[in-house]
Image (cartoon, rainbow, N blue to C red):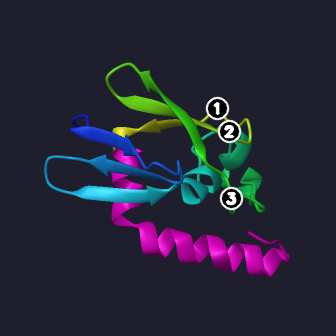
Amino acid sequence: MAAPKELRVSKDRRVLTVTFADQSHPLGAEMLRVLSPSAEVQGHSAEQRVTVGGKKDVAISRLEPVGNYAVRIVFDDGHDTGIFTWAYLDTLGREKEARWQAYLDELEQKGLAR
């Protein structure tokens, strides 16, 4: 997948807009944080996946390029181990509603708060 034309963080640091050639995806910092591709969140298998709650007010501190294929997002809660490939960011944008709803359902099932 080609690199996005633009990565733009909103002034309040709570939204990352990823603009590819064919479309833009505004992605909330909270969603990016709780769906981080890091091993800390995703585990090393589906059974090890962690449901992260309590990140409603998380913000993006900075973006760090990773080669020509990804960006590391550093969050203000200290999490910085997720490497977001262009393909993953595109997938999150295209599946945003379904993935967010699945996360909210998971929180409810586990009795966790945003």
On-image quarter of the C terminus: bottom right
- Which residue is denoted by mark 1 in the rendering? 81
Residue extending farthest to the left is 22
Residue 57 is tagged as: 3
On-image quarter of the N terminus: top left
Q: What residue is at 63 percent from the left and 70 percent from the top?
A: 103
Q: Percent from the top left, x then y, of residue 74?
A: 60, 34
Q: What residue is at 70 percent from the left and 37 percent from the top?
A: 79
Q: CA distance from mark 1 to mark 2?
A: 8 Å
Q: CA distance from mark 2 to mark 3?
A: 22 Å
Q: Percent from the top left, x then y, of residue 34?
A: 64, 55
14 or 65, nearer to the observer: 14
- The span picked out in magenta is 87-114
Q: Earlier in the sequence, mark 2 or mark 3?
A: 2
Q: Secondary structure at mark 3?
A: loop
In this rendering, position of residue 49 left or right of residue 4: right
Foreground label between 1 and 2: 1
In this rendering, position of residue 35 left or right of residue 16: right
Q: What residue is at 76 percent from the left and 80 percent from the top?
A: 108
Q: Percent from the top left, x then y, of residue 59?
A: 61, 48
Does 34 lie within the magenta span?
no
Q: CA distance from mark 3 to mark 1?
A: 19 Å
Q: Earlier in the sequence, mark 3 or mark 1?
A: 3
Tag 1 near tag 2, CB within 8 Å: yes
Residue extending farthest to the top is 67
Q: What residue is at 64 percent from the left and 32 percent from the top?
A: 81
Three-letter amino acid code at the position of disc 1: Thr
- Which residue is denoted by mark 2 in the rendering? 39
Q: Quadrant of residue 105?
A: bottom right
Q: Is residue 74 above or below residue 8?
A: above
Tag 2 near tag 3, CB within 8 Å: no
36 or 60, nearer to the observer: 60
